[in-house]
Every structure is written in C-alpha cells, then in structure tokens.
Amino acid sequence: MPPGRYLATASEFEQRFVNTFPSSATRAKLYGGWRRRREELQSLVLIEQEWIDGSFVTGKSNPQDIDVVTFILAHELEALAIPDRQRVLELTVLDHSKIVFGCDSYLVVAHQEGHPSYDQFLYCRGYWDNWWSRSRTGSQKGYVEVRAE
C-alpha cells in the first residue's frame, strides 16, 4: 500500500481486503472476528476511529491476524461502569482479543485539547502513526483508518 493513512468504511475495508482474496483461507474469518469485536465495543462505547495495519492490509493471501489500534474518547471510557470498562480492555488490549477475534489490539485513549493528558494522547497517536507508516526495513507504507459509523 502506498504511504499514507487511507480512510475507509467497514464495507470498503471488506471489499478491498476480503472480497478481492476469494481463495484466502483466513481473511473472511479474521474480518468477521474484527466486525464482531467492533460491534461489541460499539455496544459499550463510541469508537472514534480504528487504525488497521499488518499483513491483513497487504497482498498476503492468508494473514494470521488483524493489527488494530482503537481510539476511544477518554470521557466515553470514564463514563462506563467498571465491568464495562473491563470488557473494553479485554476487547482492546488483552490477549482475549487475539484468541477470540483474531485481532492484535491496542487502545489509545483520546483526550481533548486542554486536558492535562492531551500531550500524552498526541504522543501515542504520533507513535502509532510513525510505527505503522514504516515497514520493518524502514521504507514508507500505508495503513487503513476506519471511522465510527
């Protein structure tokens, strides 16, 4: 994928990275796991955006997982009851997400400008943008952003 962050709907993401690989033994299952995980998360909290990278957004026929960073607004997360917050963590940062949904998941808590943790949020966002904008060899590449629907 050429360098940059590419905005897509979930349907566009499916069309480009699942439907164009009809012989793949893993893509449809992984996409289904990502969608189920996303739907469960959305039932708990608003997903601001998700950045998706890794072999799933390459030409590899049978990727082993979907690498995803989920951005959730801090005030949305803080408003949840403790059991719901725990579930959000299970879906975004713990091994549960990889085992059950096939997603290697990470969470970025998004703070608004003026919040004491806003600079930390910008640092985390920049970290993931830089990490996913480069291949292991250091050459530039792209990744996908799926926004809230």
Image (cartoon, rainbow, N blue to C red):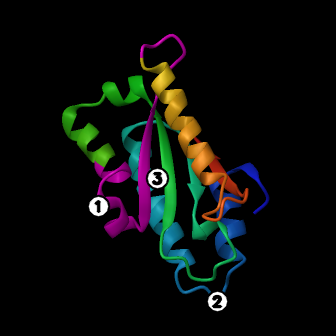
Q: Secondary structure at mark 1?
A: helix
Q: Earlier in the sequence, mark 1 or mark 3?
A: 3
- Label 1 neighbourhood size at 10 Å, few (<14), some (14-19), many (20+)? some
Left or right: 82 as drawn, with respect to 16: left
The residue tagged 1 is: 96
Residue 38, which numbered label?
A: 3
Comparing 138 with 24, the one in front is 138
- Label 3 neighbourhood size at 10 Å, few (<14), some (14-19), many (20+)? some
Region rendered in magenta = 90-116
Q: Earlier in the sequence, mark 2 or mark 3?
A: 2
The residue tagged 2 is: 23
Which quadrant: the C terminus? Answer: top right
Residue at screen point 60% across, 64% down: 136
Q: Secondary structure at mark 3?
A: helix
Q: Nearer the viewer, mark 2 or mark 1?
A: 1
Identity, as a three-letter code, of the amino acid under mark 2: Ser
Q: Is residue 111 visible?
A: no
